[in-house]
Amino acid sequence: MLAVASQDLERAKETLDTRWFEHLDALERESASIVLDFGAEEMTCPACLTTFPTGPKECPECGLFLG
């Protein structure tokens, strides 16, 4: 748990996100940056990075539930 003054909340969140992201390797960074867009023609699984046509709520490669 972290307690910060309300006026420092955004800065604290940015700092935590930045420090967390710095400790990821390249594959983890790529996975962490994926945004699932169910309206797009294709999706990329954040777990295995497989790209597939949008539709299934589960990755056809690794089985990760996406919906």
Image: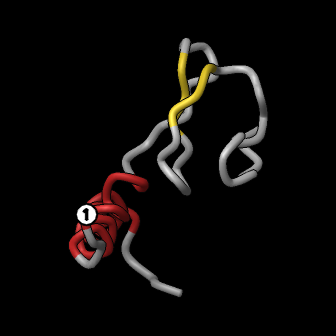
Along the horizontal axis of the image, is 6 left or right of 58? left
Tell me the crowding category of disc 1: few under 14, some 14 to 19, or many 20 or more residues within 10 angstroms, Cα based. Answer: few
SS type, badge 1? helix
Q: Quadrant of residue 59?
A: top right
Q: Quadrant of residue 22?
A: bottom left
Along the horizontal axis of the image, is 38 left or right of 58? left
Residue reaching furthest bottom?
1
Q: How is the image coloured?
A: secondary structure
Q: Nearer the viewer, residue 2 or 56?
A: 56
Along the horizontal axis of the image, is 6 left or right of 12? right
Above or below — where is 17 with respect to 60? below
- Percent x, y of residue 50: 52, 42
> What residue lies at 46% left-to-right and 84% top-to-bottom?
2
Which residue is denoted by mark 1 in the rendering?
26
Residue reaching furthest front?
61
Q: Nearer the viewer, residue 4 or 52?
A: 52
> What residue lies at 61% left-to-right and 20% top-to-bottom?
53
Q: Nearer the viewer, residue 39 or 48?
A: 48
> What residue lies at 37% left-to-right and 73% top-to-bottom?
5
- Percent x, y of residue 40: 54, 15
Say which quadrant the C terminus sits in.
Answer: top right
Identify which amino acid the numbered label 1 is placed on: Ala
